Image (cartoon, helix red, strand yellow):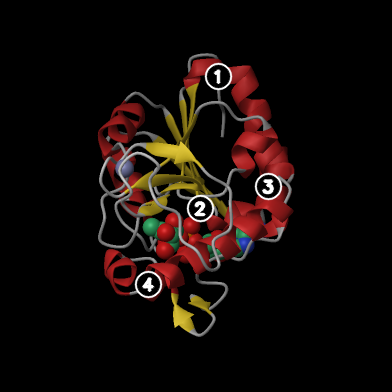
Amino acid sequence: MDLTEKSRLFVLTGAGISAESGLATFRGSGGLWNGYRVEQVATPEAWEADPSLVWNFYSMRRRDALAAQPNAAHHALATLEQRMGDHFYLCTQNVDDLHERAGSLRVHHMHGSLFQSRCVDCNQPYADSACYESALPVCGKCGAAVRPHIVWFGEIPLDMEGIYHQLDRSSHLLVVGTSGSVYPAAGLVNIAAQRRIHTVYVGPEEPLNATAFDEILLGTATQVLPRLL
Ligand code: OAD
Ligand code: ZN
């Protein structure tokens, strides 16, 4: 990837980076959970219709994430950040906390975080790692419902402005383990290409937006990322 002291690296990760930690990818699991399509449980409409179904889904994902450990790919990115400091920026589509647990500091969760919730009325996110199988949480302040702090289908990813700002000042874009099927994340490579930012994809198969990349490094995240250091 040819990083020098002047380089600024923007990293975008997807479910594939956590696959070798044992967390299922969306497309890999057929996009299904208990017979439901993920799009059926991860939407505002699903929340309106059946909040306990939605909380059940995220409770399961909390349990899975708590049982998982960061892998060599998460650690490689944390090491790279230690070296590059604020020339490094990590934007993840993942809601797990494996990047943080590997030691990454500059992490933006554009699709929200599994271990945060927020009141549907007062909106303030707060830390929450409980599992809700029966009784659902309510806001201690106003009594309204509490929802996962997750960006659902049809909702706008968090801080797109900050993401575009970070991409603008980068010299390199490294994308790891994402199928290139969910926008706006999948479109970042096209913006980078217009700005002549060098773009690299890492994953075991070509993503849907493969033609937009300068380089494709085929292999799993733990095979390829430690080698890039
Ligand atoms: P996907 O499940 O769509 O894609 C996972 C990608 O990881 C695929 O391209 C795989 O080839 C790749 N992959 C599998 N194993 C890998 C490994 N060991 N190392 C590296 N790559 C590997 O997941 P995402 O692209 O992250 O959105 O999905 C994007 C968004 O769609 C998610 O953030 C989520 C989902 O619906 C929301 O929840 C809003
Ligand atoms: Zn409230």
Q: CA distance from mark 1 to mark 4?
A: 41 Å
Q: Which residue is mark 4?
A: 39
Tell whether 185 sits left or right of 173. left
- Callout 3: CB less than 8 Å from ligand 1: yes
- The local secondary structure at tag 3 comes to helix
Q: Crowdedness of circle 3 by 10 Å Cα count: few (<14), some, many (20+)?
A: some
- Residue 48 rendering spot, x and y as whole percentages: 28, 68
Q: Which mark is residue 14?
A: 2
In the image, residue 80 above or below residue 71: above
Q: Which mark is residue 55?
A: none
Q: Nearer the viewer, residue 222 or 116?
A: 116
- Callout 4: CB less than 8 Å from ligand 1: yes
- Residue type at mark 4? Glu
Q: Quadrant of residue 81?
A: top right
Tell me, yes or no, if residue 29 can be seen here.
Answer: yes
- Residue type at mark 3? Val
- The local secondary structure at tag 1 comes to loop
What residue do we see at 54% from left, 57% from top?
A: 15
Tell whether 60 sits left or right of 69. left
What residue do we see at 68% from left, 27% from top?
A: 79
Q: Quadrant of residue 133?
A: bottom right
Foreground disc of the pair 2, 1: 2
The first of marks 3 and 2 along the sequence is 2
Q: Kindly indicate whether the residue at mark 3 contacts the one at mark 4 (C-beta within 8 angstroms).
A: no
- The local secondary structure at tag 2 comes to loop
- Callout 2: CB less than 8 Å from ligand 1: yes
What residue do we see at 51% from left, 61% from top?
A: 58
- Residue 193 rendering spot, x and y as whole percentages: 32, 41
- Callout 1: CB less than 8 Å from ligand 1: no
